[in-house]
Image (cartoon, rainbow, N blue to C red):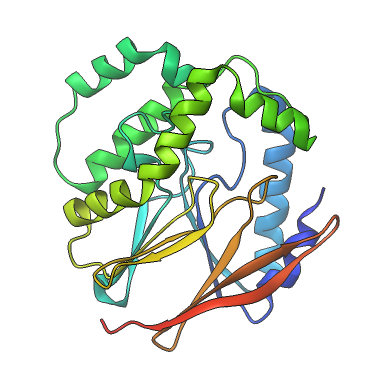
Amino acid sequence: MDVGMVEPLLEDCKTLLLNGDTWQQLAVEFRADGMRLWADLQDLCRKKNIDLIVLPGNHDPDAGDAGWVTLANGAIAITHGDAVYAEGAPWSRMALKLTKEIAEEWANYEPTGIDSRLAMSQRIAHLLLPPHIGKSRNIFLRIWDAITPPTRAFRMIVCWYCMVAQTRRFSREFFPRAKVIICGHFHRTGIWDDGKLLVINTGSYMPPGGAYWCEWNGGELRVGKVNIATNSCSRGALMGVWRIDA
């Protein structure tokens, strides 16, 4: 794998905003490759004169300078999305095992706004680092990993079912001026519009999930599918265009 496969996505790009989980900072099995690919991506952006903005995710909690970005005078809010749930990734095996430790973290939490909430997410991400992460990309092994133990599979389904409502509550509390909130944590692409708040989840580049690209230009938000092939990614079908008034 090399960063050349994402270069077609950067055509005519002036600023690239990565909304978390850009590289695997925590897991030992992936760290060396992750650092190499992350360095290559930064080099690619420099060569193409692309300004790079990086937000942290639960797999790279120490990345970037801030956990969120707003555009259009606050009308568009972008964050990774792990802060939507108290446990970060409630479906993870470590979240199932470390309920006491997570509760202790929250007992010491002092809410002062979005930055303190995202700092808590960073602490939770470090806490939930598993001792081992499998490297197989085989779809059947990944499905088996997702459904075992059954408690994990059940919690994953519940989180997917509730994620949009949870994201709306999170946005109302921390981004009350937002008309759009963009996340990516849940590995489930989707666009949900109730007329009050447009929720977009950009998904994942790992199977079996798909991914969306988002473009903000000239007052328009455009969202489309990412075509993922063996050696390259490209912009696919346009899913929607919205005029966002600040």
- Residue 229 placement: quadrant: bottom right
Query: Residue 200 location, x and y as percent?
Result: 43, 62
Q: Where residue 99 sits: x, y (%)?
A: 34, 14
Name which residue lies at 29% across and 67% down: 194
**Residue that extends furthest to the bottom in the rendered view of this protein:** 218
Q: Is residue 172 left or right of residue 136?
A: left
The answer to whether residue 164 is above or below residue 234 is above
* Residue at the extreme right: 231
**Direction from residue 139 to residue 180 in the image, left or right:** left
Q: Residue 191 at what x, y percent from top left?
A: 45, 64
The answer to whether one can see residue 3 in this image is yes
The foreground one among 75 and 70 is 75
Residue 102 % position (x, y): 32, 19
Look at the image and tell me in which quarter the C terminus lies. bottom left
Viewed as shown, does residue 32 lie left or right of 244?
Answer: right
**Disc count in the image?**
0
Q: Looking at the picture, tell me which residue is in the foreground, 215 or 66.
A: 215
Tell me what residue is drawn at x 60 percent, y 25 percent. Answer: 147
* 124 vs 172: above or below: above
Q: Name the foreground residue: 39 vs 13.
A: 13
Q: Please report the residue visible at 35 percent of the width from the left and 55 percent of the height from the top.
A: 68
Q: Residue at x 25, y 70 (%)?
A: 74
The answer to whether residue 137 of the structure is visible from this angle is no
In the displayed structure, would residue 56 be above or below residue 213? above
